[in-house]
Structure formats: C-alpha cells, structure tokens
Amino acid sequence: MALAIVPVYAALLGLLFVALSLAVVKQRRVGRVAIGVSDDRALERRVRVHGNFAEYVPFALLLLAMAEWRGAPGPLLHLLCLTLLIGRASHAWGVSHTDEDFRFRTAGMIATFLTIIAAALTLLAQAVLR
C-alpha cells in the first residue's frame, strides 16, 4: 500500500523545520555566535525550538507512516497529522518569544503527545485486530 496522506504532512513539517533552522541561522548571524549560544537568550530559545522539533517530529511521523501503511483510516490520519502540524507550530510560536505565552507551548506539547499516543495505540490496535 502506497502512502498518500502522511507524506503530505511530512513535507509541510519539513518546510517548518527549515524555517526554524533559518531562524537559528539568522540569530547566530545577528549575535555573531558560531558555536553554542553564548549568552544570547534569543538564540538559546531558537535553538531549543528547533531541537525540540527535531526530537519529536521524526518519531511521530514514523508512527503515523506505519499506521497509514497498516491501513489506518484516512480521516484519522488527517486528524493526527494536522494535530501534529498545528501543535508543532504552536509550540514553536510560544517558545520562540522571550515574553513566552505558556499556553502556546503547552498546547503544542499536548498536541504532540496526543498525536504520538494516538498513533501508537492505533498501531497496537491494528496489530491485535488483524
């Protein structure tokens, strides 16, 4: 079975990853920081937003792709992928601002965790029911 849903969201998340990467590069140039974060708090935030994205998104996409490959319903996959995309954007928005609004950060992490949990449970259900 060819994957048709998850790759579209993976592409969108890939573009978001590049945007977060460019935000780090831009702040490095502004602060003239080649390695580490020095004492640049804005750079530290951008590095962590980028790093957090890199820590969670690949695993979530792996679970989602396996669920699609195993035949998970399209509407469920769209819901989970959209939740992940919105969650990661919300988290990035919340954390990247020095005057952080924790609601965006919290909503982003909840959305990410719910996506991972739901995808994992979907895979377990697919394994048990087949």
Image (tube, grey):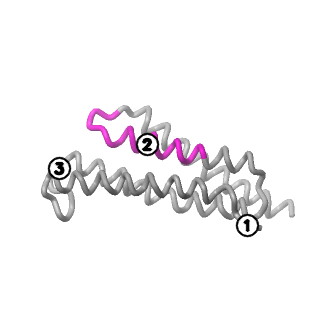
**Secondary structure of the residue carrying numbered label 2:** helix
Q: What amino acid does circle 3 point to?
A: Asp
Q: Residue furthest right?
A: 130
Give how far apart the Cα atoms at labels 1 and 2 are: 31 Å
Mark 2 = which residue? 91
- Magenta-drawn segment: 82-100
Residue 29 point in image, percent of width and height: 17, 56
Q: Nearer the viewer, mark 3 or mark 1?
A: 1
Relative to 3, does residue 101 appear above or below in the rendering? above
Q: Which mark is residue 130?
A: none
Q: Is residue 103 magenta?
A: no
In the image, 81: left or right of 123? left
Q: Secondary structure beneath disc 1?
A: loop
Q: Are marks 1 and 2 in contact (CB under 8 Å)?
A: no
What is the crowding at mark 2: few (fewer than 14 residues within 10 Å), some, or many (at least 20)?
many
In the image, residue 55 lies at what x, y percent?
45, 59
